[in-house]
Image: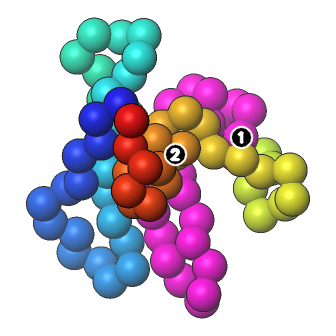
Amino acid sequence: MKVRMAKKNAIAGVRTFFVPSRTEEGVEHIVVEIKRDGRTSYYCNCNDYFYRKLPFISTNLWSGCDHVDAVKAAIEGKAA
Ligand SMILES: [Zn+2]
């Protein structure tokens, strides 16, 4: 997946990324990375995130959706 980073990020510690949907042509999901208090959190606007991932945020059971994973991989330089 090709991950784009927003050109402007107005708030320190916050970065916005755009990840194309695998299933919907021309659709991009928005992933926001927030670094605060030594923690990094990721939020995505897809349904998978909201219904299946968000309830577990800040717990050990939490994991990102495909888009969050793609952003993390891109940040770590492991983008496919
Ligand atoms: Zn997502």
- Residue drawn at (38%, 56%), measured in percent from left and top? 77
Residue neighbourhood size for the residue with mark 2, other residues' Cα within 10 Å, grouped as few (<14), some (14–19), many (≥20): many
The mark nearer the N terminus, 2 or 1, is: 1
> Of all residues shown, which one is farthest toward the left?
7
Which region is colored magenta? 31-54
Identify the residue position indicated by label 1 in the image. 53
On the question of residue 62 being in view, the answer is: yes
Q: Secondary structure at mark 1?
A: helix
On the question of residue 31 being in view, the answer is: no
Q: Secondary structure at mark 2?
A: helix
The residue lying toward the viewer, choosing from 52 and 20, is 20
Q: In the rendered image, which quarter contains the N terminus?
A: top left
Q: CA distance from mark 2 to mark 1?
A: 11 Å
Three-letter amino acid code at the position of disc 1: Lys
Three-letter amino acid code at the position of disc 2: Val
Q: Is mark 2 within 8 Å of ligand 1?
A: yes
Residue 65 in the image: state x and y as whole percent: 60, 37
Q: Is mark 1 within 8 Å of ligand 1?
A: yes
> Of all residues shown, which one is farthest toward the right?
60
Identify the residue position indicated by label 2 in the image. 68
- Residue drawn at (58%, 65%), measured in percent from left and top? 41
Q: Quadrant of residue 15?
A: bottom left
The residue lying toward the viewer, choosing from 51 and 42, is 42
Residue neighbourhood size for the residue with mark 1, other residues' Cα within 10 Å, grouped as few (<14), some (14–19), many (≥20): some
The residue lying toward the viewer, choosing from 51 and 24, is 24
Residue 60 in the image: state x and y as whole percent: 86, 59
